[in-house]
Amino acid sequence: MKPNPQLLKFIEPYDEHIQNLALELRNFITDLVPEANELIWDNYNAVAMAYSKSEKLKDAFCHIAIYSGHVNFGFNRGAELTKTSIKLNGKGKLIRHLSVKDFQSFPKEEIQSMIWEAVGISENLNSALIDKKSQPKSIVMSISEKKIRPGNKTSG
């Protein structure tokens, strides 16, 4: 699935390295789970994409959040992952993430197995997602009026 033109517009204010890193991480997910929908938020403090076999955030298995100096690669139910040799950050009830500065050092093999476990967790919570083979969609969920972006403190 090609990047949504609106997503490309949302990430324009970010440094080219951050844009490329976000798109590489995005491609990593969409190549691995090609049937996943991409849910996009142009939020106040970050651009975020969640990946779900449905069109609902509650079914998402992982996500990407773009900030000015790094990109977070996260798991929506990361606290429930068992097959992790990677230390994920986060103190909340469920969400865990890894801060990524470059794609070369991104632990692709370990993350790949974690993604498959996360997909399984999502499918266990919603059995309608099992063997779902629909055409993936890239959907803009919301656009914040005011935003903090590189180069300007706030816009909107």
Image (cartoon, grey):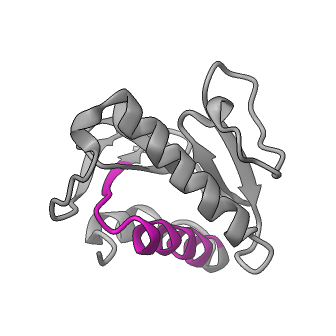
Taking 31 as reference, is 116 above or below it? above
Question: Residue 11 or 116: which is nearer the viewer?
Answer: 116
Taking 96 as reference, is 6 above or below it? below
Q: Residue 64: tell me if it is visible.
A: no
Q: Percent x, y for residue 51?
A: 40, 51
Left or right: 83 with respect to 64?
A: right
Magenta span: predominant SS is helix
Q: Residue sitting at 48 percent across and 37 percent down? A: 121
Left or right: 110 with respect to 24?
A: right
Q: Residue 78: tell me if it is visible.
A: yes
Q: Is residue 29 magenta?
A: yes
Q: Is residue 140 magenta?
A: no
Q: Percent x, y for residue 106?
A: 74, 70
Q: Percent x, y for residue 142?
A: 29, 40
Q: Percent x, y for residue 96?
A: 67, 37
What is the span of residues highlighted in magenta in the rendered image?
A: 18-40
